[in-house]
Image (tube, rainbow, N blue to C red):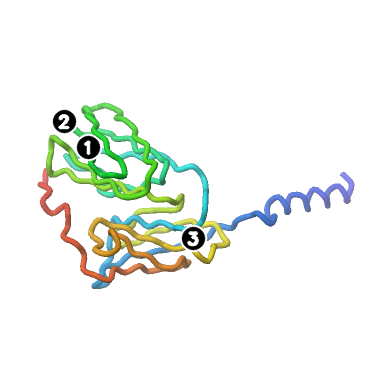
Amino acid sequence: MRRSTVFFLLVGGLIAMFGAGACWGEAVRVQVLDVSGQPLPEAVVSVAGLGAGAPPADVTLDQLELRFVPRVLAVGRGGSVRFLNGDRVNHHVYSFSPVQRFDLRVKRGEDGQSIRFDMAGTVVVGCNIHDWMLGFIRVVDSEHFAVTDANGEALLDVPMPWPEAATLRAWHPRIAENDGEVSAPLAAQAVLTTSRPLKPDPWLETPDYR
C-alpha cells in the first residue's frame, strides 16, 4: 500500500473518531445528602438540559416477599416498565397517579405485563391485595440517570461538552422541597443536599415478612 493511501486512511479514521460532532463522555459522581449531612439512598439522580438522546431502555419492577423490588425505580420518559411477580401469591398492582394510571392483575409465576410511561413525573404504586406494599416509579426526561446506593452515591456517564444550562436533579419520596426534588449545576463531582428535614419514612408501616 502506498504511503499516501495510508495517510489518507489514517486522517479519515481520525476525522470519523474526533470530528466536530463527536462527544466525549465523562463520569459524573453525585452524592445526595439530607439536611443533617446523612446519605440518602434510593434517590433518583438525573441530568437535565442535554437535549434529545438515545431511546429509553425498558426496566422491570418485581414483587418479592410481598414487597416491590426495587422500592424506587427510575425509567426514562417513553420507556416501559414490566411488572413481574416473583412471589408465591398473586398481586393486584395499581396506580392512581396522574402521570400514569393503571390496574394490573399479576399472577404468580407470570412474566407480567409492560406499561409505557410517556409523561415525566412520579408514579406511586400499590397492591390492592396487600395494602402495605408501596413503590415509586420516577419517570425522568433524560437518558442519563441512576439510583443512589447505600452511601447516597450514583455514577453517571455524561457526554461532553456540557451545555451551560445542564443541571443535576435528585428526587426522593422523602425530600420535602420542590415536589421531592433538589438540583445543582452539572459538575464532575457534585453533592446535592436537602434544605429541609426529610418527610416521614413511607415504608415504616411495612410488615416484616422475612
Where is residue 73 shown, x and y percent of the image?
Answer: 31, 47
Where is residue 162 shown, x and y percent of the image?
Answer: 54, 62
| Circle 1/circle 3 CB separation < 8 Å | no
> Mark 2 against mark 1, which lies toward the viewer?
1
- Quarter of the image where the N terminus is located: top right
Q: Amino acid at mark 1?
A: Tyr
Where is residue 101 shown, x and y percent of the image?
Answer: 27, 38
Residue matched to label 2: 89
Q: Secondary structure at mark 3?
A: strand
| Circle 3/circle 2 CB separation < 8 Å | no
Residue matched to label 1: 94
Q: Amino acid at mark 2?
A: Val
Compare residues 92 and 118 and report the one nearer the observer: 118
Where is residue 60 shown, x and y percent of the image?
Answer: 33, 39
Image quadrant in which you'd find residue 67: top left
Compare residues 63 and 10 and report the one nearer the observer: 63
With respect to residue 147, does 184 lie above or below? below
Side of 25 where 95 appears, left or right: left
What's the residue at 16%, 39% (across, down)? 66
Of pointers 1 and 3, the one earlier in the residue sequence:
3
Categorize mark 1 by other alpha carbons within 10 Å: few (<14), some (14-19), many (20+).
some
What's the residue at 28%, 34% (across, down)? 84
Q: Which mark is residue 17?
A: none
Residue matched to label 3: 27
Q: Amino acid at mark 3?
A: Ala
